[in-house]
Amino acid sequence: MAKKLGKLFQRVRVTSGYIFAIIFIYFCRPTAELLLIGSAVAFVGLLIRAWACGHLRKVAELDISGPYAYTRNPLYLGSFLITIGFAVASGVWWLAALSIIFFLGIYLPVMNVEKSELEAVLGDEYSAYVRDVPAFVPRVTAARSSDRRFDFQLYLKNGEYSAALGVAATVLILVLKAYYIGSL
């Protein structure tokens, strides 16, 4: 049952995110200070996602370089920080809590499904990686060393610039909302 639910969440996570974003924007009450703090946190998340996408080879081989030496899910860690940033910027405590619950409710099952899929494809190599590298909260030191460096072409191929555009658009919408409600 959990695997089926995780598979469903894999398919609907982006669409449900857009629906949640509409609700979020309607109810949020950003202020200049919260926008500044939240945008800074979201930007850190965006940098982590960008770093990860410059190393991500999507199951062609086990990714252990860059942020993958610290956490198995740096893309989701970055997305979580973006969520935290926008939760702070929202200015509404219950909306911030709902944002975090929504994120964890969708992505924790997805991470479990992806773990099972990677174990099936990569076998013992992935199992060893799982023993060394935490699923979400990063290690302080790299679990493994790699000669592989950030590859900007890989970043582009993985389409990560769309996340940057999404964060920029969301910040702009929050600034406009703050202006509209008179908190800027």
Image (spheres, rainbow, N blue to C red):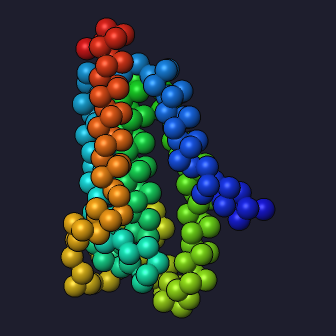
Q: Camera-side residue: 21 or 143?
A: 21
Left or right of 93 on screen, residue 177: left
**Is the residue 9 above or below the residue 148 in the image?**
above
Image quadrant in which the N terminus is located: bottom right
Q: Quadrant of residue 66?
A: bottom left
Q: Residue at x 51, y 28 (%)?
A: 22
Residue 54 seen in render: no
Instruction: Tell me where residue 86 appears, x and y as whole percent.
Output: 39, 35
Instruction: Tell me where residue 170 appears, x and y as whole percent.
Output: 36, 33
Left or right of 38 on screen, residue 7: right
Image quadrant in which the C terminus is located: top left
Instruction: Give the residue furthest to the top.
Output: 182
Q: Residue at x 37, y 54 (%)?
A: 78
Instruction: Tell me where residue 30 appears, x and y as whole percent.
Output: 36, 21
Q: Camera-side residue: 160 or 86?
A: 160
Q: Residue at x 29, y 37 (%)?
A: 168
**Is the residue 85 above or below the residue 23 in the image?**
below
Q: Residue at x 50, y 20 (%)?
A: 27
Q: Camera-side residue: 79 or 8?
A: 8
**Is the residue 38 above or below the residue 177 in the image?**
below
Residue 59 seen in render: yes
**Is the residue 173 above or below the residue 110 in the image?**
above
Left or right of 105 on screen, residue 43: left
